[in-house]
Image (cartoon, grey):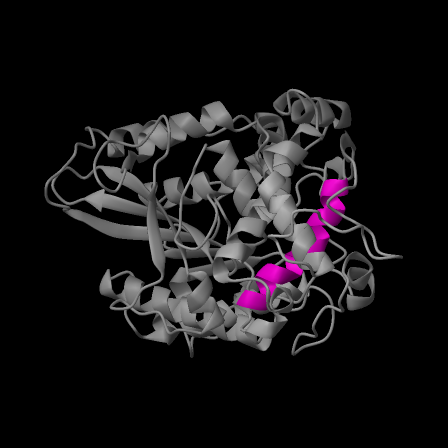
Amino acid sequence: MHTPFLRLVTVAVLCGGVAGAQSVDDTQLKQVIIFGRHGVRTPLLTNTALNAFSALPFPQFPVSGVGTLTPNGRKNETLFGGYMRQRLTQEGLLTGNDAADSSFVYVRANDVPLIMQTAQAFAAGLLPVGNLKINAYTAPAIDPLFDPVDAGVAQLDEQMAVAAVNGRLGAGPQSLSSAYAPELALTRAILFNYPTTQTSPPAAPQGKVDVTALPITATAGNSTLPVNLGGLAALTAAIDPFFMEYADGLPMPEVGWGELTEAGVSQITRLYNLTLDLEFRTPYLARVQSSNLASHIVRSMVQSATGNGTGGALGSPSTKAVVLIGSNTNITGVAALFQLDWQMPTYPPDTAAPDGALVFELRQSQSSGEYIVRASYVSQTLDQLRNQTPVTLTDPPAIAPVFIPGCSTSNATFDCPLADLVRLARHVIDPDSIDIFN
């Protein structure tokens, strides 16, 4: 059922006033939405498939299967949940009584083993004895929050999708080869085991596929990757293990066969992020694929502010914490819809890191009664993941305040009046790509 986005006169009343650049923060946290990515996992291809791209065999992870949450990935997710427990308890949103707090926490995850296990690990850190329920659509049902196209909520025009991506590439997809020449050169040297300083790169080993030389295209794709990027898709699959090898704590001789440092992993990740950018940050694709999720996020904050049950909101009016666990594609799409950017230590710009989360805080000024939204991106650094470093209030993960264009004020935390966010959401969200169901 498609409906126009919310028209909320009550919010305008509750949010009267202007969010100025206050010298003293007199706001109280009323609700938090933690929109996170799954934890560190095994590669998405088998080693047999990956070995076709490399001179040396890829290392084995400590757990079998493709796209499987690793033991260290689970531990890091629980550590992250524990940090959020400390933070929300300090803010007074949680009490420390897990049994009581669990009634005010809503958790939703995409029904994929990797993501469900991540949600369970996060919940184990957030409320260790709270026995939180993980809400999910059980397969074969498809969750319209995380996959609105396959769920039939949103309709993707394949020709428009291809045109939108090609329109961003100017001279054509192959122009990416020159724009990302340093990353491609580093990737080829790592995969084919020769020094990056070698002035005359060798030919590809016999029987191996040089993924850095495959033609990049932009043609019709599928519901998972709406545009077929040709060789860029194979390249992304080939380099995906490097990030996970480092983050999961594999011995350094097994991270890019001993040739990749943290900086090298970060540089190669730019190629991975390029695929996400084209597939999910392209404005047309973000509008179709992410409007429903964005709509539910905004509706949930409106429901909390008004105290009235709202169609399409997550949880109930009394819900204090909403936890959404999906993939980096989901986070990238919502960020694109609102033009959100962040820069975290050890990562390329706008990386949706494993365990990381886009956080929306609904806060209320104690002097004016105004509701504001404060956005941030929170994630463990690569080394915090690698070392399974406990993150606490005194030794926190990386945190970056996020500016919301068309809404944020100029204060240090980029506060956005809730009424302005509702107006912005009505502008950027596609009313034909949303529903008001949970």
| Residue 318 is at least partly visible in this image | yes
Picture coordinates of residue 107 (x, y %)?
A: 50, 60
235 is within the stretch colored magenta:
yes
Image-based side of 239 in relation to 126, left or right:
right
Q: Residue at x 58, y 43 (%)?
A: 182
Q: Nearer the viewer, residue 277 or 100?
A: 277
Q: Nearer the viewer, residue 336 or 26?
A: 336
Q: Residue at x 39, y 30 (%)?
A: 422
- Placement of 338 over or under 374, stated as above or below: above
Q: Residue at x 69, y 72 (%)?
A: 59
Quarter the N terminus occupies: top right
Picture coordinates of residue 301 (x, y %)?
A: 38, 43
212 is within the stretch colored magenta:
no
Picture coordinates of residue 127 (x, y %)?
A: 40, 72
What predominant SS class does the magenta segment belong to? helix
- Placement of 375 over or under 119, stated as above or below: above
Region of the chain picked out in magenta, as a range: 231-246
Q: Nearer the viewer, residue 320 or 336?
A: 336
Picture coordinates of residue 342 (x, y %)?
A: 40, 43
